[in-house]
Image (cartoon, helix red, strand yellow):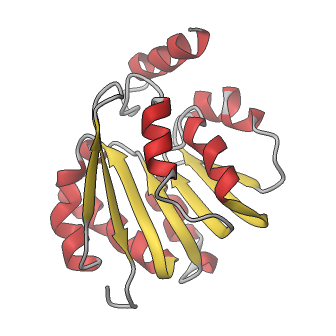
Amino acid sequence: MKNKIKFLKNFFEDGKVGAISASSKFLVDRVTDKIQPNLNIIIELGSGSGVMSKELLKKLNKNGILYLVENNENFVKEELEAIKDSRVVIFNGKAEKFLEENASTNNSVDLIISSIPLSFFTPAERKNLVKLVHTRLKVGGEFIIFHQYWNLVKKNLIEIFGNVNVSYEVRNILPCYIVTSVKKNERN
């Protein structure tokens, strides 16, 4: 209950938090069931309180890296820094800034997963984010979005990735779409 109150407090204090509650166990399980094990590099955009992050660590190989990207400083200090695992690298800032500044990950990331509030982005920012994600992923790498407003990037995902797979989880506050696109080649 304490964690739910902290999450809700961050939602009201920071106008950029896109959810009123952490992801439910049902949503986390549904998303992580889609992910192959033994990945080398995962980037989580909008790590929030780390509920998904802890499960993503189980999908990483022993020498892998999990980048946690979170704009809310309270989540970083109170939740993400409490995850004690040498494979975790935390970035406190905007997702697009992280992706722009970490060109060393070009064409090498196995999975990028995002729950960032796309409704706070302009159409140009959403398209730029999808392009940056595509550039970072290796061929065969996946981009998973879990959020209520995935349709805001539907056109961009189809244009840039050329493929979209959608499912839905109702057992979450709020019910949530799970959208997966796979990088087929350098163009899409």
- Quadrant where the N terminus sits is top right
Q: Nearer the viewer, residue 174 or 133?
A: 174
- Percent position (x, y) of residue 147? 32, 43
- Percent position (x, y) of residue 13? 44, 18
- The residue at the point 53 percent across, 36 percent down is 48
Q: Nearer the viewer, residue 21 or 104?
A: 21
Q: To which quarter of the image does residue 116 belong?
A: top left
Q: To which quarter of the image does residue 39 belong?
A: bottom right
In the picture shown, does residue 72 fall above or below 124? above
- Percent position (x, y) of residue 86? 84, 53
- Percent position (x, y) of residue 57? 69, 51
Q: Nearer the viewer, residue 101 or 175?
A: 175
Q: Nearer the viewer, residue 4 or 46?
A: 4
Q: Could you tell me if residue 23 is visible in this image? A: no
Q: Is residue 153 left or right of residue 135?
A: left
- The residue at the point 25 percent across, 74 percent down is 163
- Quadrant where the C terminus sits is bottom left
Which residue is at the far bottom?
186
- The residue at the point 33 percent across, 90 percent down is 187
In the picture shown, does residue 17 fall above or below 70? above
In the picture shown, does residue 89 fall above or below 188? above
How many labels, in total?
A: 0
In the picture shown, does residue 176 fall above or below 163? above
Q: Is residue 152 left or right of residue 131?
A: left
Q: Could you tell me if residue 2 is visible in this image? A: yes
- The residue at the point 36 percent across, 33 percent down is 18
